[in-house]
Image (cartoon, helix red, strand yellow):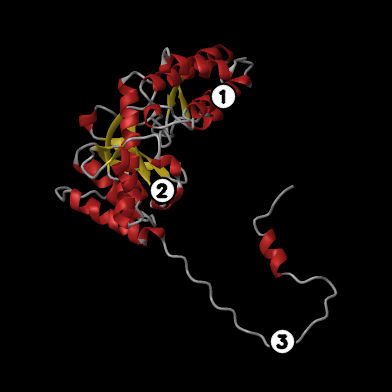
Amino acid sequence: MFHNDYEDDFFEESQPRFQPMKRRATKSKPKPEKKESYETSQDVQHWLKLQEKEASSAKEFHPTRLDKRRDGAWLQSSLSQFYEEDLITDVLYVAKSGKEATVFCCTAHPSTQAELLAAKVYRPRMFRSLRNDAIYRMNRVVVDEFKQAMHGSRAKRVMSRKNTQARALQVASWIAYEYETQRLLYEAGADVPKPYSQIGNAVLMEYVGDLERQAPLLREVRLEREEVRPLFQRLLWNIELFLSCNRVHGDLSEYNVLYWNGRISVIDFAQAVDPRHGEEVFPLLLRDVERVCQFFARYGVEADAYAHATQMWAEYVGPIG
């Protein structure tokens, strides 16, 4: 049944038919409070101040694409240090916009030996998301303000705090972990974009695409018959390689695999987990494999997802006893 977002409000306010009209004094309704931009919240302002302390003022960055954006100050703070460190020279366009982050196509500085780079900037709403999302408080290494790993009870205490400083630390730890995961996998030879830098709430990486557009997602392309089986096997190989690096993507599907010139690139490691730092990770691995198998089943590929996942897990865990 189709559900209209406004139906509940309508039925609450409407009156049953034929109900006798009653005279009553009209009261002026209070004006609805104007929603405040989340960029002005205490958490976000605290984060911006921390970034200002760390950033140098040697070079000023004024990308033309950010001037008229409501979140211009947030983006300026997020990207300026990449400019100061001679990694990017300008922002060209928005390549991808999601709930938690926006990816910008940037002109790369000649020192990077690349033409384009992708800057993934997490939005202020990430402060809200981390408050109730347990996936960021388990199955991963927590780092402190000095980017040193914390373990055991100390990590649990930090990640359970409710104050502004603790949430800023949670955000920093979350983003640093995603960057380190991508760097680890890239160096191992996985099909992931090359990571260049991570500063504050932004990650800079290889751009997959060209001056006109970002590479399409796997779900947006129609594969040729001869490339179906090789790409299917390549994705399974990547999942197995991730596991050998002590990582499970945790949210892998055709929605976070880029396709460009016959090759794939796996992206979005925000929910990646480390099997060594928690229990019940196998279901996440199985779900990744299942989603890959379900997508390629549309092309006639028959595969036993459970068999593939259990074999990977058995090789990772090794002989018992």
Amino acid on which the number 2 mark rests in the picture: Leu
Neighbour tally class for label 2: few under 14, some 14-19, many 20 plus, Cα within 10 Å: some
Neighbour tally class for label 3: few under 14, some 14-19, many 20 plus, Cα within 10 Å: few
**Quarter of the picture holding the C terminus:** top left
| Residue sitting at x 38%, y 33% | 211
Q: Which of pointers 3 and 1 indicates the residue nearer the eye?
A: 1
Name which of mark 1 and mark 2 comes first in the sequence: 2
Q: Nearer the viewer, residue 286 or 41?
A: 286
| Residue sitting at x 58%, y 24% | 295
* Apparent side of residue 308 relative to residue 24 in the rendered image (left or right): left
The spot of residue 32 in percent (x, y) is: 53, 72
Up the image or down, 7 lies above or below 292; here it is: below
Residue 110 got which mark? none
Q: Secondary structure at mark 3?
A: loop
Name which of mark 3 and mark 1 comes first in the sequence: 3
Residue 290 got which mark? 1
Neighbour tally class for label 1: few under 14, some 14-19, many 20 plus, Cα within 10 Å: some
Label 3 belongs to which residue?
24
Label 2 belongs to which residue?
130
- Residue 234 visible in the snapshot: no
Q: Secondary structure at mark 1?
A: helix
Tell me how far mark 2 sits from mark 3, CA to CA. 47 Å
* Apparent side of residue 299 relative to residue 314 in the rendered image (left or right): right
Amino acid on which the number 3 mark rests in the picture: Arg
Q: Looking at this view, name the residue that lies furthest to the right.
A: 18
Total marks placed: 3
